[in-house]
């Protein structure tokens, strides 16, 4: 799922369209009162709000950084096979442990988001038959 719009200006058409798509996508994770967790910068997936309020929050505040797999809103493509081998025969890392290790390095050494993206792009290019998880942008 393309999420490049997430880092665009909050008043841009791409961003607003992206938020609309997110709201539609997240509809499947409504609770019994029709509310969803709000991933805006203030709520950080801690509070449930109506779909309309979440949309307003996201348009006015933006997503909280780092929410790249919408696992609290029904997205699970990486999570469900997170325990899978990184590549056939790999005994060292699962897909998840590899991603977490990379992300830990990014944080420990203050890599910029851009440098991290470029590293992931390089890894995807080099191992294009490999881990789908690497295609997720991490901020
Ligand atoms: Zn919010």
Image (cartoon, grey):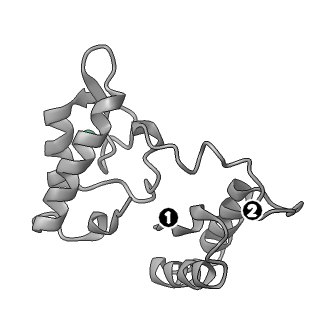
- Check mark 1 vs ligand 1: CB closer than 8 Å? yes or no: no
Classify residue 120 by image quadrant.
bottom right
First along the sequence among labels 1 and 2? 2
Vertical placement of residue 13 versus 46, above or below: below
Classify residue 88 by image quadrant.
bottom right
- Under circle 2, the secondary element is loop
Q: Which mark is residue 136?
A: 1
Vertical placement of residue 22 versus 138, above or below: above
Task: Indicate the position of residue 110 as horizontal and vertical percent values.
Answer: 57, 77
- Report whether 38 appears left or right of 138: left
Tell me the residue at 17%/66% (across/down): 14
Point out the residue furthest to the top here.
32
- Report whether 92 appears left or right of 137: right
Of residues 50 and 14, which is closer to you in this image? Answer: 14
Of residues 127 and 40, which is closer to you in this image? Answer: 127
Tell me the residue at 67%/49% (across/down): 82
Which residue position is annotated with label 2? 86
| Badge 1 density bin: few <14, some 14–19, many ≥20, Cα 10 Å | some
Vertical placement of residue 4 versus 100, above or below: below
Gap in angstroms between the C-alphas marked 1 and 2: 15 Å
| Badge 2 density bin: few <14, some 14–19, many ≥20, Cα 10 Å | many
Tell me the residue at 61%/42% (across/down): 80
Ligand 1 image position (quadrant): top left
Classify residue 96 by image quadrant.
bottom right
Task: Indicate the position of residue 104 as horizontal and vertical percent values.
Answer: 67, 65
- Under circle 1, the secondary element is loop
Tell me the residue at 23%/71% (across/down): 8
């Amino acid at each position: 799922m393309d999420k490049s719009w997430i880092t665009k200006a909050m008043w841009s058409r791409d961003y607003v369209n992206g938020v609309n798509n997110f709201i539609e996508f997240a509809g499947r994770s409504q609770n019994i009162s029709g509310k969803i967790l709000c991933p805006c910068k203030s709520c950080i997936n801690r509070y449930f709000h109506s779909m309309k309020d979440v949309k307003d929050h996201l348009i006015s505040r933006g997503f909280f950084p780092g929410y790249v797999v919408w696992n609290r809103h029904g997205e699970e493509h990486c999570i469900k096979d997170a325990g899978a081998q990184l590549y056939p025969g790999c005994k060292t890392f699962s897909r998840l442990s590899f991603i977490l290790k990379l992300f830990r390095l990014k944080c420990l050494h203050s890599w910029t988001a851009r440098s991290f993206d470029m590293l992931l792009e390089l890894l995807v290019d080099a191992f294009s038959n490999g881990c789908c998880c690497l295609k997720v942008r991490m901020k």
